[in-house]
Structure formats: C-alpha cells, structure tokens
C-alpha cells in the first residue's frame, strides 16, 4: 500500500499542474453542451416547419403543387449561391472534413459554424416545403460545426486535435437527434473513426454523452417513436422475418446505389438537365414530390414520423397509409435528395423500412405484427447506411423489452451484408466524390477506396459549370 502512495500523490500533483489541459477539456465540454442545445433548437424549428406545412395543406389541399416546387427551387438557389457545403445529408461532409489529405484551409468548405447555421435554416425550409427528408443526418454536420469551433479557444499546444472535435461533434449530433447517447458513441466508432487512433477517447465519449443529455433534458427520456410494446416472438414469424431481411437488404442497397449514381451524374437527359439548369431541375423534383404527396393523401410528405408511428400502432386512428406507400416514399425520398436540398435520409429510411415490414406482414397474413415492422426499419436503415450496429442501437431504443434484441442485431448485420453485394457504402462514397473536387489532381486519401469515375462535367474547375450541390464544395470557401 505504501509503495503506491508516492505514485498516487505524484500523479495527482502532475494532473493539478496541468491547469491549461483542464481548461481545454472544460472548453470542449461547454461546446458539447452547446452542440446538443443546437440540435434541440434544430428539432424544435423543424417541428414548427412541419406544423406550418400541414396548416398550409389544411388551407388548400392543392397548395403543395405550387408551394413545394417554388420553395425547393429557392432552397437550391440559395444553397448553390451561398452555402454549397450545406447541401445533402451532412454526414459525408463531416467524413470529408476528417480526411487526412484535405488541406486545413479547405476544411471550412465542409464543416464550420456558419455552415451549421445554414444547415439548420435550409433543412427546416425543406421541411416547410413538405419534402421527404429528415433532420438527423444534418444534425451531424450542425453539431460537428459547433464543436469544431472550439479549436479557436484551445491552447496552442493542446493535445485535442480537430479530428477529435469532429468525431465528437458528428456523433453528438446523432446522440441528440435520436435522444440516445449510446447511438452516438456507436456511430462515432462505426462511421467516423474508421480505425484512426484517438488520444482523447474519454473526452470524445464524454462530449457525445453530454450532448445527448441535452436532448434528454429538453425532451425527456422518450424514445424516437415512443415505446413499442413487442409481443413474444414465435416460430411462425421465421419465414416472414427472413423475407423482411432479404427485401430490406436488397432494396436498401439499391436505394443507396441509386442515390450515389444520381448525385454523381450519369449520361442521361435528367442528369444533363440537373447540370445545365439545377434550379429548374430542383423545381421539377419538388413538383413530383408534391404530386406523389397528393396521390398518397399527404402521407408521403415530410420525414415520415407520423406514418411510421401509425404503422407501428396498427394503423389505428391517424393518417391513411396506402398500399403502395413504401414505393411512393422510396421515390419521394430519392427525388428530394436528387434535387440538391440539404436534408437527411435517416428518418425516411426508417419510414420506408417500416413500410417494407408492414407489406410483408400483410402478404404473409401477419398484418399488424410489430416485430416485422421493427425488423424492416432496422434492416432498411442498416442496408442504406451500411452501419448495422448504429441502426440496431437506434431501433433497439424504440423497443420495450429484450425479446427482439438478438433478432434486430441479426437483421441489421445480414441486411447490411446483402446491401454490400449491391452497392458500396453510401456516405464514404459521397465523401470521396466531394474530396475529388477539392483535392489536387491525383491526390487521394490513403484510407479511402479509389473515387468512382466522374462524368466530364464533374471534372470542371470550381464555378465553371459543375454542380456544387452534389459535391458540397462551396464556390466561395471563404464564406464558410
């Protein structure tokens, strides 16, 4: 015991003498709390925007045919003109900002405090337009932008690196958006770190948890869709469950591949129109989303929270869910993403997955079976993001009880594996496309796979006829 006392007091004195280190840690924790509160404010703003859009539909059921395309065109115009780095989901931007080959001077094109403010405003505007998008992916870029700003206040020789701040910020966004700190920690490990060494792992995890606690303190310890009461699993759900896994894995992989091809651009008329007239193309996408919304009696509009909850509750009272809801939501989400507006696909993916589970349940005579719907949600989300553990944690937090833990985990792993046979991981692929536009010719990240081939237009220099909304490359980096 005596032999350990000198070491203890020596270590304690050493820690106490490192005053500036503790100041740096305190600064990061304050920024983590601010990041969590920023996501909370973002959530409230999108809720107001959704309520305003529903009020507009109540005034005139035909209003989205004018309102949605007009606002979509305005959002894309503003994004391309002032905030190119705010386009799309936000997760690829954070990945691109963390790439070791990216010059420090170009990092602001992907992550900054100003871009975070633009992301909040533009994504909320997309919700106000009734587009099929979510706030969860954008929350990653918002929180990363807030936490990354802490570097201005850290000491000159601090051991806290920008990479640590981006990891903590991005994962904090997931933790606060889904009201589950555990999902944020897993997301950091599975998607953002990618085997890189961290010297401040404890600080990063603490920042993620603190940001998540800001959401818990604001909204209460409530699950994303409320608590799902799951009945006991039985062997008669084996075949329907396997069908859900297969369908969600294949469809999620196809969805991921479709998004990557659309944003990259292929030699077809639609992609040519998008490159030549991006504002007109965005308006056309907005009109098609509005038309789909009318056909679906409004259920396709927005992120899909209400439709998903109705499916989970057995369609009790609430919005009407048509038989082709899954296909319509799939198309509406694809068009929304293709238009170039800032917005995420997490919530729409959960909605599409819930639709897959519901459709399989109906076809196999198991209508209203919550376990199949939950399997569809975790399967499709895991297939699209190819982050099976994160998808499993997110959906597991919605389930009341432990009856489905192993089933959800197995579904996420298998569906993600099936998706990899169809498409490359979506977010790293989009990040590579963004980096290819800002890195010097021939430069590539040593940790990234070769970037996919690009069409001739995408190889143009910045500001010369290429679509910055697909790449996230701001035409005026200094504005970021």
Image (cartoon, rainbow, N blue to C red):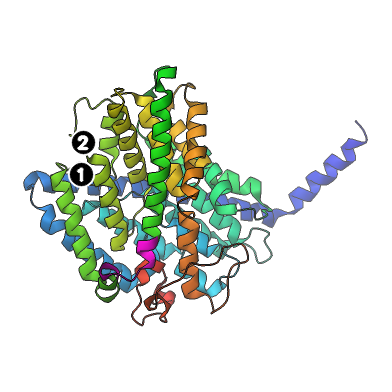
Give the main secondary structure of the magenta stretch.
helix
Closer to us: 393 or 322: 322
Closer to us: 111 or 374: 374
Mark 2 falls on what kind of element? loop
Closer to us: 383 or 67: 383
* Label 1 Cα crowd, 10 Å radius (few <14 / some 14-19 / many 20+): some
Q: Would residue 205 appear left or right of 355 to someone viewing this image?
A: right
Residue 475 vertical placement versus 402 (above, below): below
The boundaries of the magenta stretch are: 261-271
* Label 2 Cα crowd, 10 Å radius (few <14 / some 14-19 / many 20+): few
Q: Would residue 169 appear left or right of 300 to someone viewing this image?
A: right
Mark nearer the viewer, 2 or 1? 2
Mark 1 falls on what kind of element? helix
Report the Cα–Cα distance between label 2 and label 1: 25 Å
Name of the residue lying farthest toward the right: 3
The reply to whether residue 33 is visible in this rendering is: no
Quadrant of the frame with the C terminus? bottom left
In percent of width and height, residue 447 lies at: 61, 62
- Count of all numbered marks drawn on residues in the image: 2
Question: Which residue is identified by label 2?
Answer: 323
Question: Which residue is identified by label 1?
Answer: 51
Residue 269 drawn in magenta: yes
């Amino acid at each position: 015991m005596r032999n350990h006392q000198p070491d203890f007091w020596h270590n304690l004195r050493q820690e106490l003498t490192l005053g500036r280190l503790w100041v740096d840690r305190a600064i990061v924790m304050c920024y983590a709390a601010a990041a969590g509160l920023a996501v909370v404010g973002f959530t409230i703003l999108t809720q107001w925007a959704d309520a305003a859009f529903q009020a507009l539909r109540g005034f005139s059921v035909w209003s989205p045919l004018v309102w949605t395309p007009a606002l979509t065109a305005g959002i894309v115009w503003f994004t391309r003109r002032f905030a190119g780095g705010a386009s799309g989901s936000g997760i690829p931007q954070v990945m691109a900002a963390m790439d070791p080959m990216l010059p420090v001077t170009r990092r602001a094109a992907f992550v900054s405090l100003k871009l975070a403010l633009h992301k909040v405003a533009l994504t909320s505007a997309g919700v106000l337009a009734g587009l099929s998008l979510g706030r969860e992916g954008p929350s990653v870029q918002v929180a990363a932008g807030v936490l990354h700003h802490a570097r201005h206040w850290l000491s000159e020789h601090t051991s806290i690196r920008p990479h640590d701040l981006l990891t903590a910020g991005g994962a904090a966004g997931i933790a606060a958006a889904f009201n589950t700190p555990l999902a944020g920690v897993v997301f950091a490990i599975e998607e953002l770190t990618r085997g890189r060494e961290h010297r401040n792992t404890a600080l990063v995890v603490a920042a993620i948890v603190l940001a998540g606690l800001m959401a818990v303190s604001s909204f209460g310890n409530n699950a994303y869709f409320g608590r799902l009461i799951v009945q006991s699993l039985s062997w008669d759900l084996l075949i329907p469950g396997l069908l859900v896994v297969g369908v969600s894995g294949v469809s999620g992989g196809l969805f991921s591949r479709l998004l990557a091809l659309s944003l990259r651009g292929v030699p077809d008329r639609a992609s040519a129109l998008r490159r030549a007239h991006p504002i007109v193309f965005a308006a056309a996408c907005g009109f098609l989303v509005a038309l789909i919304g009318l056909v679906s009696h409004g259920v396709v509009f927005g992120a899909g929270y209400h439709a998903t909850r109705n499916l989970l509750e057995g369609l009790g009272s609430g919005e009407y869910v048509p038989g082709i809801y899954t296909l319509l939501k799939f198309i509406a989400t694809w068009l929304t993403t293709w238009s170039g507006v800032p917005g995420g696909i997490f919530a729409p993916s959960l909605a599409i997955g819930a639709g897959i589970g519901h459709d399989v349940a109906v076809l196999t005579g198991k209508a209203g079976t919550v376990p199949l719907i939950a399997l569809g949600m975790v399967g499709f989300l895991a297939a699209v993001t190819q982050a099976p553990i994160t998808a499993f944690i997110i959906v597991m937090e919605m389930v009341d009880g432990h009856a489905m833990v192993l089933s959800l985990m197995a579904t996420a792993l298998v569906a993600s594996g099936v998706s990899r046979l169809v498409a490359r991981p979506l977010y790293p692929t989009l990040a590579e496309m963004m980096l290819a536009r800002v890195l010097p010719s021939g430069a590539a990240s040593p940790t990234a796979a070769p970037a996919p081939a690009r069409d001739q237009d995408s190889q143009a220099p910045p500001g010369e006829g290429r679509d910055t909304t697909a790449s996230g490359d701001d035409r005026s980096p200094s504005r970021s």
